[in-house]
Structure formats: structure tokens, C-alpha cells
Image (tube, rainbow, N blue to C red):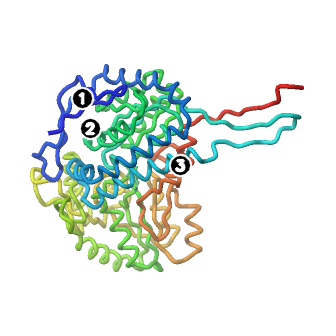
Amino acid sequence: MNDLRNYIDGIWRPGGGRPCESIDPAVPTRVVARWRLATDSDVDAAVAAASAASVGWARENIHERAQYLRRAAVLLRERAAGIAADLTAEQGKIAGVARGEVERAASILDFFAHDAVQSLGESYSSPRPKELILTHRVPVGPTLVVTPWNVPLAIPAWKIAPALVHGNTVVWKPSEHVPLVATHLMEALADAGLPAGVCNMVLGGGSAASRALEAPVIKACTFTGSTAVGLAIEHAAAARHIPVLTEMGGMNAAIVLDDADLDLAAEQIVAAATGWSGQRCTATSRVVVQRGVAERFTKMLQDTVALLRVGDPLDATVEVGPVTTRRQFDELADAAARARRDGELLAGGVAGAAEDGYFVSPMLVRGLPAGHELARTEIFGPLVVIMEADDLDDALAEANDSDFGLSGSLFTRDLDCVLEALDRFDVGVLHVNSESTGADPHVPFGGFKLSGTPHKEMGQSARDFFTRVKTVYLRSGSR
Ligand code: UN1
């Protein structure tokens, strides 16, 4: 049994709070890890360590800082098999996807190590003699990183790596559902030799994040998770006037027009709706299909979903593993009942009891009244609501009728429709003829509306968030 600890000021220390367990969602009676919840004083110690280490870390050469990330990436790859097995056990990802996430996290660390050799500023001409005007980047300062359970390695990697390479120290609070997976990433960073206090991990609940956020020495916060928590974090950060990045919910729509390659659209939409058991903020949860092909396309979605195998995430023939938490399992069972009551549940649902694993077969729902809550409220799981539209205008109106605006897909071969959607599909990430999921490390990622703050993640956007730009007038010391 794993007995997990916080990592504070370079030391693995047990938390002082109540005992907790993480469980295997495929076999919920199986405990995967135990630990004691971080207390306020554990959080305070982590914050103090991040504060004490911050001056030295900011002074360290960026090339040296990058080396720690590269070493951690090597360690993740060396340990990939064990980490992936624990990811499957604690979070439920099917084995192949779990291995993919370990590699994704390692390549994100490598990617941000490369920031050391990127341009860090600009130079401007001066209207005065013997003067140069430059921009120079300095760290934001100790940063609170709060991460979710659905992408427990890659999301922390794409927040922590740019924070560290740009000279910020970190207090990281991972989700309570995945402390073992989080510990693997923390171990890789610690074993890479990071100086004490530079990156600290506290295995706490939501109150640990709130407490850290109140600490005056915390100078920025980056969060991925639910909209409710993200908004509370935004308010707390605004009250302290510190930069905050939130990446929250999605109710992502895929528009399928009459002229689309329907085989491609069905394959991509089903992958986007059911991959990782639909537990992806970029998952497709609404399909808006043009009336002329609606009947045919709905049948194609049914046929594609029917081929999916749901079950043991270690079985290589399985495509859909369990959902991660009991709460989601119950919510999805409830959603299936509402879908049957108010519309037509064409496929899927919850067949077994929670005790036998949190397995949910991908659900296709149609015939709901306009504005029904199943098409408006994010349910983190494999559930797709199918709607019909007359034409592109109508489809865009349906797709945009959402509080969220993370990602969206458009399936068509009509360039005019694509150009129209480029301007009018109100999402932060638009996929033309491909699934709504995914995010590449060198490309800005983030949503509109309630899906998050305007700051994007990854690529150069990460550098922009984790640094402050100082304008420097550099003039000769002699007349
Ligand atoms: C992806 O689709 O690979 O929580 C990115 C999430 C998003 C990241 C998904 N923040 O699912």
C-alpha cells in the first residue's frame, strides 16, 4: 500500500489531517493509496518554502532551470510503465491512453525546457541617441497550481513546467482523487534535483487551495477544473489583484452540415465524446446536425457507438474504461433517467451497480425540448445530445447557445461555411473536420466565456502568463 506524503521544502512529510484513500474506479473496493490530508500548517509550510526559495530560483540561469525539466522528463520515461499502471488504477484511463499521457507529460517538460532558447523579449528603436529600448521578462513569483483528476500528469506538467522554467516557485495542489499519480510527477521533479522549496506539493482538499491563495506571498494562480471552483478562485485572486488563469468547463458542440464526409464525422465525434470516458473538458457533448442528413447521421453515430467495448481498462480490446468518481457515476445514472423521461435515449446508460465498477456506456440522446438542461449543464462523462438545425446560421445559433465556449468542431467541405464559422463559432479552439479534443504544447489552448479566463495556456501564452514584462530604457553611461 502506498502511504503518500506532501513534498515541502525538499522533504517528503506526512500530512497532519484526517486519513484519506484513493480507490480504483474499475474495482471500487480496492484502495490504491492512503494519505493524511494536508492541514493549514502544511499549506503554510509549503507557501513559506516557495517564498524562501523564490529569490534564488529566479536568479538561477534559465538554461540551468531547463535542465531540471529535461532530467524529470527522462525519469518519467524511465518509470513510464509503473506510472501508467498507477494512472489506470487510480483514475481509470485505459492502458494505452495512460501510457500516452506519461509520454505527453514528458514531452511537455521537454517542450518548456526549450523556452530557455526562445526569444524572451523585444527591442525597439529609440528616438534619443545612445539608447536602446527593450522588454525584459521577470518571474511573477511563487505560484499556486491547482489541477484536476482527469489529466493528472499532463495538465500539471503544462502548468508547472513553464512556471519553473521562467523562474517561479510553485505550490501545487493536485486533485484528491489522484494523489498517487501526482506523487509520481512530483517524484520525477524532486529526483531531477530541484532545489528545496522550488516545487512543493500539498495533498489537501479545496480549503488547502483557498488557504494558499490568501497568502500574500503567492503572486499568481493557475487552475484547471470545475466552473464553480474556478470562479471562486478568480474572485479570490481578483480581490488580491494577482494574475489568475482558469480553465473550466465545456459543453462542446460539433456541427455536421449536409455536405460533410459523414463517416469521418461519425468516427471523430464518437472518439471525442467517448475517449477517456468523456472526461475531457474538450469532449464533444452536443451534436448539431443539418436536417437533411440528421436521420442518417444519427444512425451512423448509433452504429459507431455500438462497436465500442466498455469495461476493464487493462483489457487491450476495451475502448471505454470506468468514469473516475462515484459522484459522476451517480450523476450519469441520473442523467440517463432524465434523458429517457424528457427525450429519447438512443444508446448507452448505466447497466451495473456502482460496487462493480463505475462503468457507463456512452449515451446518445435526442428529442429533448429546446434549452433542456442536459444540453446546457456540463456532465463530465460520455453523453452526447443530438440536435437538428436548418442551415449553418441555425446550427451556429444552437452551438453558441451555451454559457461555455471551449472547443467546437465543424464538419463540412464547403469553404464558405468554414470561413463563416471561423468568425462566428464562439469557441477558443475550433476544429474543422476533426474531433474537438486535444491540445499541442506549442499552440495556445483555452476557451471563451465561462470556459476560462482570456489567458491561454501552453506555447508562448504560457511564457506570457508566468512572466511580467519590464520595459527597459537602456542608455549609455557616458554623455
Ligand atoms: C485535451 O483534450 O487533451 O481538462 C486537453 C481537460 C482540459 C485539457 C484537455 N483542460 O480535459
Which amino acid, by three-letter code, is at mark 3? His
In the rendering, at what x and y percent does residue 313 appear?
Answer: 20, 59
Labels 2 & 1 near each other (Cβ < 8 A): yes
Which residue is at the front of the view, 238 or 459?
A: 459
In the rendering, at what x and y percent does residue 471 appear?
Answer: 71, 34
Apparent side of residue 56 relative to residue 8 in the rendered image (left or right): right
Q: Mark 3 points at which residue?
A: 114
Q: Which of marks 2 and 1 is nearer the N terminus?
A: 1
Give the quarter of the figure containing the N terminus: top left
Distance from the alpha carbon under mark 2 to that under mark 3: 31 Å
Answer with the quarter of the image where residue 157 lies. top left
Q: Can residue 238 be seen in this view?
A: no
Labels 3 & 1 near each other (Cβ < 8 A): no
Q: Which of marks 2 and 3 is nearer the N terminus?
A: 3
Q: Mark 1 points at which residue?
A: 37
Q: Residues within 10 Å of mark 1 (few under 14, many from 20)?
A: many
Apparent side of residue 216 relative to residue 328 in the rendered image (left or right): right
Residue at (59% x, 61% y) in the render? 423
Which residue is at the front of the view, 68 or 93?
A: 68
Which residue is at the front of the view, 283 or 193?
A: 193
Secondary structure at badge 3 equals: helix
Q: Mark 2 points at which residue?
A: 176
Residue at (45% x, 56% y) in the render? 439
